[in-house]
Image (cartoon, rainbow, N blue to C red):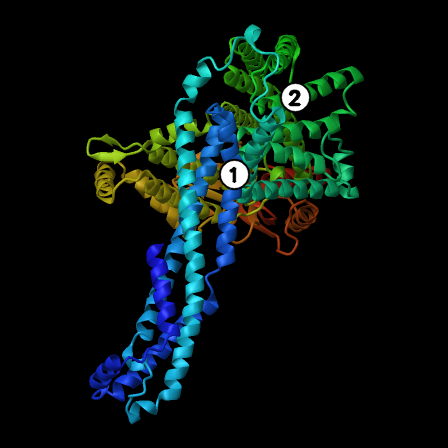
Amino acid sequence: MKLFTFRLFLLSLLVLSFCRADAQDKILSADSSISIPDTLLFKIQKAQAAITEVNAANKKGYDIENLKNRLNDIQENIKPLQLDFRDSKNKLDTKSLLSYGLILKDASTRIASLRTVLIKSNGELQRMSQSIIDLSSDSLLSITQTDDAEKKLYLPQLQEIRLKLQSAGVLTGKNLDQVSRILANVSAFDLVINDLKTQADDQLQHSGEVAVGKEAPFLWNAPLTIVPDGGFWRQIQSSYLGQQQILSYFINSTWDKRILAILFAGAFFFWVYTNVKLSKRAAIKRKVGELQFEYLKAFPILASFIVLCNITPIFEPDAPSLYIEIIQFLLLLAMTYHLRLVLPERQLKYWLVIIALFTVLIIGNGIASSSFLMRIGLLAINVFFFYLGLRLYKHLKITQFTRKYVKIVIGILIGFNGLAILLNLFGRLSLAKAFSVTGVIGLTQMIGLAVFMQIILDAMELQIKISSCNKGIFSRISHSNTRASIKKALHIFSIILWVMVFLINMSLISGTFSFLEAILVKKRAFGSIHFTLENILFFTAIVYVANKLQKHVPVLFGEGSLTYDSEVEHKSSKVALIRLIIIIVGVLFAVTASGLPMDKLTVVLGALGVGIGLGMQNIVNNFVSGIILIFEKPFRIGDYVELADKKGKVKDIGIRSSKLLTPQGSEVIIPNGDLLSGRLVNWTLSHDYVKSELTFKVGTGTDLEALNKMIEEETKQTSHVMDSLPIEILVNAIAADSVEIKVLVWCQSIYTESAFKSELMSRLLKRFIEKEIKIV
C-alpha cells in the first residue's frame, strides 16, 4: 500500500509540475541535439499510443461496481454463517456443518475467481501507471526555454500530450485506488472464509464424538428454560438465518437440476392431459368405455405436482435435509388436498394430526435448545409416533408395496423413535433429532411413493388403452406382461428414492457416494491387465441394454407376433439390419467403456481368430451369411419359402439364424448359411398367387366337352380363384377304361391353396354325382 501511495504521489508530481532547472536543460540540449527530430517524433508517437491504450482501457472500465456487488453478495451469504458459528459455540449439528461446508467451499471458489480478476486488473493498471510515469519524466517530452528551434516546432503537440498524460494519470490513479481497495477487502474476507472452513472441518471431524457423547444434561436434570446470550429469539433468529442461507445457497446453485425436474413433471402433465383428452373422443370411448382414475383428472395439476415432489431427490441428491423436509411437507399437503374428499372424517383427523406433528418436529429440529420444555415436547412427539408405528405394524396394507417392505418401513419408524426417546433422555439431542425426523419421513415418504406409483400406473394404463385403440406399440405386445414389468420397475425406483432420502436425513448421502466412488474407481489388476469396477459395470450395463434393445426392435418397427394364418404382410429386413447396427455399436461402446488397452484388445482378437480357425467356422459363416441376406434380400419376413424338406412362412430374420413357421404350427430354426448356400424356393417373392394343380380320372365314356364346361363353371365359383388368369383343363393320360384329367388353376395365395382345393373338389364331387359321372 505504501508503494502504491508513493507511485501515485510521484505520478501526480511529474504530471502537474513543469521543471525548468538549467542543469537539466543543458543536459537535455546536449543529449537531444543530435537525435532531434527523429527521436522526438518516435517519442511523440509512443506517447500517443500509450495514451490511446490507457484511455481505451479506462473507457472500457474495470467493472468496479460489479466487482463490489460480487464481493458484497459473497459477504451477505457468509454473514449468517458467521452469526450461527458465533452463537452456537461449537455445537452445530452434522447436517448444518455439511451444508455450511458446501457454502464455504463455493464462497472460496468465488473469492478466488474474484481475486484473479482483481489481480489481473491491478497489474494492468500498475503497468499503465508506470508507463505514464515514464513518459512524464522523459526529458524529450519536456518543454524548456533553451529548446532549439526544431523542437519548438512541436510545442503544440508536446503541450497536448502533457495535458493528456495528466488526464490519463488522474483517471488511472483513481481506478487503481478502487481496484486496490477491493483487492485488499477480498484478501481480508478470504481469511475469514478460511477461518470458518477450519472451524467447520474441526467441528465435523469431532461431530461423531459429540453426537455420541453427552451434549446436554439428563432430561430430569435439564433446566426448565435456557436463555442464551442475546435472548431466546436471538437464538431462533441465528438458527433460522443459518438454515435460510443453506436453502438460499442450494436453491441458487442447483437451479439447472430443478428446471430438469420441472420439465419432467411438465412433460408428464402434457402426456396425461393429451391422453385424457383423446379418451373422450367418441371413437375411442366406444372401445374402452368410461375411464375412471383416482388421481388422473382432465387437468392433472395435482398428479404432476405429486410426481415432481417424489422425483426431486433423484435430480438433487446433494440436497440438504431441510430441503427434503420441506419437499415432503409440500407432498403431504398435496395428498391432503386429495384425501379430504376420500378419507372418512375420523381417518382424516388422524392424518391431519400426523401432518401437524410432522410440522412441529421439523421446526423443533432446527432450534438448538436443550431446555426441559423443548426436550419434553420432542419426547411427546416421539412417543406418539412410536405408538402409531405399533398400531400400524400389523394393520397397515399398501397395495403398491409388498407386505415385507411396509413392515420394514414401520419397523424403522418404531425403532428410530424408540432410540430417539432414549437418546433424548440421556442428553444425546443431535442423534435424537436425526432419528426422529428420519423415522417419520420414512413413513410419510412411503405413503407418497405409493401415491406416486399409482399415478404412474394409471397413466400407463391410460396410455395402453389409447395406444391399443390406435393400433400403436401397445397393440403389439402383451398388456399383462407390460403392466407387470412397469410395476416392477416402479417398485425398484421407489425403493431407490426411499433409500436416498433416508441417507440424506441421516447425513450419510455424501459419505455413501464417496465410498461407492472409491470402490468403483480404484485401480485393480488381473495379471498385466488393469481395470476398475466402474469399467466392468459400464461394460455390463451397455451389453445388457444393447441386447434388450435389439430383441425389442421388431416391436418398435410395428412387427408383432406372426402366425401362419394371419394376414400376409411382408416386412423388409431393415429390422435385422438395425439389430446388427445396435449390436456393433453396443460392442464398440462396451469395449470403449471397459478401458481395455488396444494392445490387450489385439491379443483378445488374435485369440478369437485362433478360436474361429479351430472350431467357430460355422458360427462365423452363419453370421456373415446373415449380413449378406440383409443386403441381398432373397426373402422377407412373411414370405413363404421352401428349403429341402422344410416349408413355411418366414417369421424372423436374425443375424445367425432365421425362423420358419410351418403350416403345422412348429417353428423351424434354420442357420443362415444353409439359407444362403442351399436351393431356396421363394413362393411369394414377387407375388402371392400360385398355380394349383388338381388331377382325377373319369371313365372313357364321359363327355369331355361337357366335363370341361362343368369344371370351368365350378372353378369360377370357388373362393380364392384368380379370375383374371385363365383356367387350363388338360387330358393328362388315357388308359383302357379311364381318362386322366389335369386342372391348372391360379389361386390367390399359397396360404389358401389347401382350402381352395378342398372347396373345388367338394363342388366337383357334388356335380359329378348329379350328372352321374363316374370317377375311376
Residue at image x 69%, y 21%? 356
Q: Secondary structure at mark 1?
A: helix
Q: Position of residue 380 (x, y in %)?
A: 64, 11
Q: Position of residue 505 (x, y in %)?
A: 53, 24
Q: Looking at the image, is mark 1 or mark 2 nearer the viewer?
A: 1
Q: Position of residue 388 (x, y in %)?
A: 65, 11
Q: Quadrant of the C terminus?
A: top right
Q: Are marks 1 and 2 in contact (CB under 8 Å)?
A: no
Q: Quadrant of residue 345?
A: top right
Residue at image x 23%, y 37%? 611
Question: Can residue 52 be seen at all in this image of the molecule?
Answer: no
Q: Which residue is mark 2?
A: 360
Residue 293 to residue 59: above or below:
above
Question: Can residue 110 be seen at all in this image of the molecule?
Answer: yes
Number of numbered callouts drawn: 2
Tell me if 189 is positioned left or right of 276 in this view. left
Q: Name which residue type carries label 2.
A: Val
Q: Name which residue type carries label 1.
A: Lys
Q: Which residue is mark 1?
A: 79
Seen from the viewer's position, the closer of residues 350 and 26 is: 26
Q: Quadrant of the N terminus?
A: bottom left
Which residue is most to the bottom? 149
